[in-house]
């Protein structure tokens, strides 16, 4: 019988300890900054060239990248019910930025996932998501923090970790609207 997180006490404790760590990332506009490793997936964020300096109402792309350890995979943003937790990228409401359209996801692999008994779409190695960002019209001039949260689940052939949330930050310089 295949042992999974749900029926293996030693794995469950290790996974829960790993899931307890949530790491914030602080970055500079346009610079790639990664979270501290605390599991098989390390997230980073950087802005495209337009992210360095923005005016209120302006738009740019944030590139959110998952570096995935060998033997592990990350599930796509489109997963069927009854399967794994899909990857969900959001921005908290209490900031001068918002998602400005559809998030562009890389092409995923598709296969039967024995952990769930369903076909899943997943990434191995790395995956970069392009998040369109709009600066709020009322954004205050100066250096502002763009906050991005990624809710995701990672599995290997033998083990699935519980879903967790990575919190990423990117500094963006907002110019005066004038």
Image: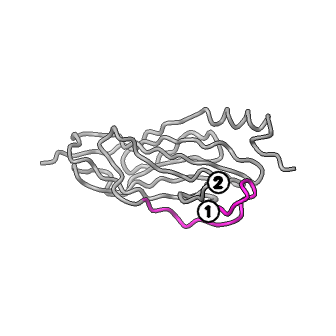
Between 39 and 53, the one lying in front of the other is: 39
For label 1, count other residues whose C-alpha is less than 10 Å away and answer few (under 14), some (14-19) or many (20+): many
Does 165 appear above or below 111?
Answer: above
Horizontal side of 142 relative to 90 (left or right) equals left
Decide whether residue 27 is among the magenta residues: no
Magenta range is 103-121
Q: List x then y, in percent, for residue 159.
A: 74, 47
- Residue 5 vs residue 17, the one in the foreground: 5
Q: How many marks?
A: 2
Residue, far front:
81
Real-space CA distance between mark 2 and mark 1, rounded to the nearest whole angstrom: 13 Å
How far across and down, in percent of the image, does residue 116 sit?
71, 54
139 vs 67, left or right, is left
Residue at the spot of label 1: 121
Q: Which residue is mark 2?
A: 82
Which of the pair 41/160 is nearer the observer?
160
Q: Secondary structure at mark 2?
A: loop
Farthest residue, direction right? 1
Whether residue 109 is in magenta: the answer is: yes
Disc 1 element: strand
Above or below: residue 16 compared with residue 28: above
| Residue at 25 percent of width and 45 percent of height | 174
Residue at position x 31%, y 40% in the image: 144
Residue under the image location 69 percent in, 66 percent down: 111
Q: Is residue 20 left or right of residue 172?
A: right
């Amino acid at each position: 019988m295949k042992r999974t997180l749900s029926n293996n006490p030693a794995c469950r404790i290790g996974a829960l300890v790993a899931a307890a760590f949530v790491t914030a990332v602080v970055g500079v506009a346009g610079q790639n900054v990664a979270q501290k490793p605390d599991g098989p997936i390390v997230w980073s964020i950087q802005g495209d060239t337009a992210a360095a300096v923005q005016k209120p109402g302006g738009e740019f792309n944030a590139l959110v990248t998952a570096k995935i350890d060998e033997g592990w995979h990350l599930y796509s943003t489109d997963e069927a019910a009854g399967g794994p937790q899909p990857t969900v990228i959001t921005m908290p409401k209490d900031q001068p930025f918002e998602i400005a359209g559809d998030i562009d996801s890389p092409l995923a692999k598709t296969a039967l996932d024995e952990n769930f008994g369903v076909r899943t779409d997943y990434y191995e190695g790395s995956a970069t998501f392009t998040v369109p960002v709009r600066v709020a019209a009322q954004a205050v001039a100066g250096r502002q923090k763009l906050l991005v949260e990624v809710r995701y689940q990672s599995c290997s052939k033998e083990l699935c970790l519980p879903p967790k949330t990575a919190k990423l930050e990117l500094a963006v310089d907002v110019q005066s609207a004038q």
